[in-house]
Amino acid sequence: MTHSGEPHRFAHLAGTVASFDDHAGWGTLRIDDGAEVFFHCTQIADGTRTIPVGAAVTADVLPIGVGEWEAANVERVPSDDSTAASLSRSANRR
């Protein structure tokens, strides 16, 4: 985000899912600096059509109008717990 509180022309930013409407297929991300950005379920990178509120994510933030921004390429950030569990399962298979 810039000092004026608006994202750069294009930025890859971190944040969390602030809201998501499963029926409508859209939600908002709260970028780490506090701004909220719209996203549609077709922009979830892993191909799923839903994402839980509170999930940590990264996303490309793009301008869609004057003072309006949209998130694309929304990717969940694995939690330390899920990464550790995955590594533990891999180690147990050896």
Image (cartoon, rainbow, N blue to C red):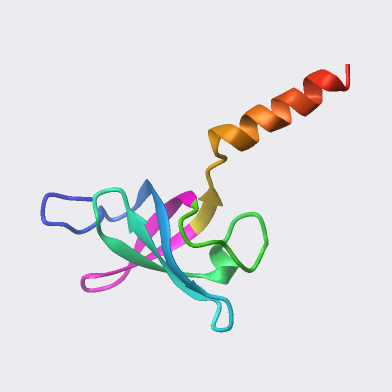
- Residue in the picture at 79% in, 28% down: 89
**What's the residue at 65%, 55% (across, down)?**
46
Q: Is residue 59 magenta?
A: yes
Q: Residue at x 67, y 61 (%)?
A: 47
The quadrant of the picture occupied by the C terminus is: top right
Most foreground residue, 2 or 51: 51
| Relative side of 49 to 79, left or right | right
Residue 64, quarter of picture = bottom left
Residue 50: percent from the left, percent from the top? 61, 67
Which of the 4 image quadrants contains residue 19?
bottom left
Q: Nearer the viewer, residue 21 or 48?
A: 21
Residue 32 lies, with reference to residue 79, above or below; the image says below
Count of numbered badges drawn on the protein: 0
* Image spot of residue 22 (x, y percent): 58, 77
The residue stretch that appears in magenta: 56-72
Outermost top residue: 94
Q: Is residue 87 magenta?
A: no
